[in-house]
Amino acid sequence: MAVLVSTKQYRWNRERYSRWRRSLDIWSFVLRFLAAQWLSEKSWSYQGGITPEKRGHRRRRIAIWVRENLLDLGPTFIKVGQLFSTRADIFPAEYVEELSKLQDQVPAFNLEQVAQIVQTDLGKPLEKLFLNFESTPLAAASLGQVHRAELATGEIVVVKVQRPGLRQLFNIDLGIVKDIAYYFQNHPRWGPGRDWMGVYEECYRILFEEIDYLNEGRNADEFRRNFRQVPWLKVPRIYWRYCSLRVLTLEYLPGIKISHYGALDAAGLDRRRIAELNARAYLEQVLNHGFFHADPHPGNIAVDPDGNLIFYDFGMMGRIQPQTKEKLVQTLMSIVDRNADGVIESLVQLKALMPQGDMGPVRRSLQYILDNLLDQPFEMQSIGAISEDLYALAYDQPFRFPATFTFVMRAFSTLEGLGRGLDADFQFFTVATPYALQMMNNRSNGDLLGQLGRQAAQMSNSALGLPRRVEETLTKLERGDLVVRSRSLETERLLRRLSAQQASGNYHVLTGSFLISGTILLVSGFGWLSLLAGVLAGVTGWRGWRVWQKHERFERLF
């Protein structure tokens, strides 16, 4: 395995680096950033005048400069930058894209420091604990580095050792970051509508959890238990006798990095199967376990010679509470139904949207996305495109996505990119569709109307949305939400007539389904269920007639 270390010397890695100098370096970066932001908004600072293209180009340059400076400022800011790469609701797209490139490869520390940490934490020198301990690390990152070793029993392990003085550096840096967050909270340009102190508290919690190696070991054990019945996913076993807050010893499970496509081909592995298994693994984590890997970059996922997935690094994990999953189901059902009000209500309950006096602009923007989002079947949707639309909406609206939501969206976007790298025809939602249906099934389990609803949910989502089109048009007219576009009047009328015909036809299909179901139930001796199916057939038939009548009324209006 190649040694992933950097030879560049950074300021934070120097000896005699005082707290006063640290504060000066950090605040200097912040003030230069604010000056660059202020200048980018002044038209006179652009040669030949300001244009959207010039502003975008300058934002990109500033974002690159921010990424390079965060790397130079060290472990705390590398991790903060990586967390911010998930917060497209508070940063422009150029910043998010550049921060997602933030590489976590820094200079390794020497074996003497490793030996001292191990002996201090485990109470014995390296030679007493391990039969063999390789001096050159397999990998070095901002928080620690990994060495291969051999136990006295002959088992091959990897030993993860935390970078010296890291906790002290975090305490210093996060104290300064808290002051910066307070400054931004009260800044006239960046403060309004932004909970910077909340963002700081979130970063503080996540960073200190990640440098607690005992917590990481517990996460790995829980993750492995969740997949104990899954033969195609492996998790390294933890050797608790050789663990502490700063030392973590794990089973050595080598594999091919999931993004090394050429190596996978050379090993004769099925890349299409790997892409599907990777997506299934995350859907299981998020939708079934409620406990998921929040940092799924390619370096944390490998493939063994048999084509099984191997997961590494469990320092950053996400957890979804049952009540949150229920609200996510409500959001999903409202999206499928193109119900902007329902989506807004569930997002407010999730605390992803801050309620305000006039929600009209938010509703109109969201409705526009929903109307265009579901033009293709569910299976053909792109999680990346959905994320971009949501974040573009969120940046100028009162959306404040919780960390769990942004971690999930980043994980799914990363998985989609990996999947398409492995298989050009990969569609994330093709794998996700059965899980989405299962969530809706579980939500309505035991309810006869829910049972009938599940049959409808398996139909094309386009067909489900069509019956509402004409009715929603009238509602939009009443609200003033209708966007008027210039088209041929005859073409518009033809499209409306076709839409109403298809909508009415869908209701008639459902009516026929209920009638057939009622007949079967009657023959089978379930009289009351047959009666209920007959009532539902009448209701859907009436709804189909009402859709057509509203279409005729709409035609008369124009």
Image (cartoon, rainbow, N blue to C red):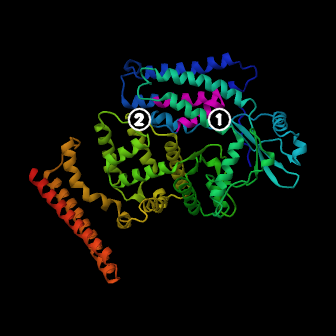
Given the current orientation, which residue lies at the most extreme bottom position?
523
Element under label 2? helix
Q: Position of residue 465 (x, y in %)?
A: 30, 57
> 525 or 30, which is in the foreground?
525
Name the residue carrying label 2.
395
Name the residue carrying label 1.
208
Q: Residue at x 77, y 42 (%)?
A: 137
Would you place residue 458 above or below residue 53 in this image? below
Q: Residue at x 51, y 31 (%)?
A: 198
Q: Residue at x 67, y 46 (%)?
A: 313
Q: Which residues are magenta?
A: 59-85
Q: Residue at x 65, y 43 (%)?
A: 315
When asked about the image quadrant of residue 497, the answer is bottom left
Given the current orientation, which residue lies at the most extreme right position?
128
Tell me which amino acid carries mark 1.
Answer: Phe
Report if residue 302 is visible in the image. Answer: no
